[in-house]
Image: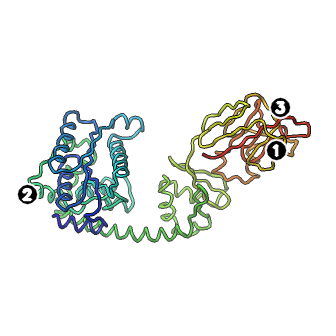
Amino acid sequence: MNNLVATYLNDLGVQPHHKVLVAVSGGLDSMVMATILLELKFSIGIAHVNFGLRGAEADADQLFVEQWGAQHRVLVYTTQVETKLYAQQHGISIQMAARELRYQWFNELTAQHGYDFIATGHHLNDSLETALINLSRGTGLEGLAGIAPRSGNRIRPLLRLTRQQIEVYAAEKQIAWREDGSNQTDAYLRNFIRHRVIPQLKKVTPTLENSFAETTIHLQADLKLLQHNLHQWQTAHVHQRGDDLILSVASLSNPHIIPYLWRTLQAYGFGWQQTQAILAAATGQPGKQFFSKTHVLAIDRGELLITRRVETPPEVVVSLEPGSYVMGTQTLELVLPVAVEVITNPEVAVLDAEKLAPTLVWRVWQPGDYFYPLGMDKRKKVSDFLVDEKVPVNKKGRVTVLESAGEIVWIAGLRIDNRVKLTKSSRQAVLFRVTQM
């Protein structure tokens, strides 16, 4: 079995000279994996997470792993985390919380100690269970292919081995392990599929694991082909402009475009149904926006603009004296006194200090706001001004204003108000500058 794992790792680009952080729970799979990697002369460290969910049993698991590490002269890293509290704070399941906490810590260890890879003990049966779970919830090719052999620096050395093969190996090598009692309950979907669904499928197809292994090989090959084509399309049609991702609406005319668009938008949190709605709206009235948990997609002047989502920060009270203030990702600098001279740079506002209140308010603009643009005696809605200035839809929500006594005196970085401009009679000036952090 060692040779099988060595060949598999070589195919994944992993060699014995690489430094591998091995995730070890103390269970059968991880103990076999650690043993094999040690026998293959890999430079390994052990990482064990105590999730604080099983009391004394979890503490015993940690002690078991620590003793194994000492016996085999392998460095063991351990940590204890508040999984339930993390799940409550982030509104996610216990299983998802454990996964996030585990990999956050693994990544920290990797960066701190120079590990090349993180190895987890997933095997072929785990991959089959994952594929069935994904199938039951709705999935694409990646979901049907089960667990990926390698994801970045994460590797699964046992992924081509069945649970039975691992059990036989453990018996032959007399490898001790700890049994997690939660694996016996059918309360979790994975356990239900493992204990109830797969045994029924094996009655129909006794070689189910081997058949699934062949299927994953074919699906992984198809995925590589798809990813190659997707990369070519993205290189031609998807571009970066500052912090924005830009897609031309004209590039979406291909009748087979939706899988390309969906796989592009998927990385930014947009789902299949949203992608369909975006495609339908792309040639319609500009200004429509779509939201994922992390990003905003706006349709604007023949383009799809994707920007990281930013929550509206609270307003900031500004005293009319030298200093700087922070709102979200922006900084407002106030310089007083300055020379009484007109500066035409719109990114800087030089205003008549005597026309301003002692205290001002800096905030994000709101619908209904208006001001008197420099050079105009009539007021104008901020929304109309932003349209005239061709401010992209996805950037409008980040535009801020400076307000004095309830009146807007500056659209930050764009235009000052005509009523606070410098004149021949101005005696004192104040300078404002807003920058991105």
Q: Quadrant of residue 9?
A: bottom left
Three-letter amino acid code at disc 2? Answer: Glu
**Mark 2 against mark 3, which lies toward the viewer?**
3
Three-letter amino acid code at disc 1? Answer: Pro
Q: Quadrant of residue 79?
A: top left
Task: Please identify the residue farthest to the top as the structure is shown.
Answer: 358
The residue at 29%/64% (across/down) is 14
Q: Secondary structure at mark 3?
A: helix
Q: CA distance from mark 1 to mark 2?
A: 83 Å
The residue at 75%/45% (across/down) is 348
Q: Earlier in the sequence, mark 1 or mark 2?
A: 2
191 is higher (above) or lower (below) than 223: above
Residue 274 percent across, percent down from the top left: 52, 54
* Mark carried by residue 373: 1
Residue 311 percent across, percent down from the top left: 57, 41
Residue 33 percent across, percent down from the top left: 20, 56
Neighbours of disc 2 within 10 Å: few (<14), some (14-19), many (20+): few
Three-letter amino acid code at disc 3? Answer: Glu
Q: How is the image coloured?
A: rainbow
211 is higher (above) or lower (below) than 63: below
Q: Quarter of the image containing the C terminus?
A: top right
The residue identified by callout 3 is: 354
Q: Quarter of the image containing the N terminus?
A: bottom left
Between 206 and 423, the one nearer to me in the picture: 423
Q: Secondary structure at mark 2?
A: helix
* Mark carried by residue 172: 2
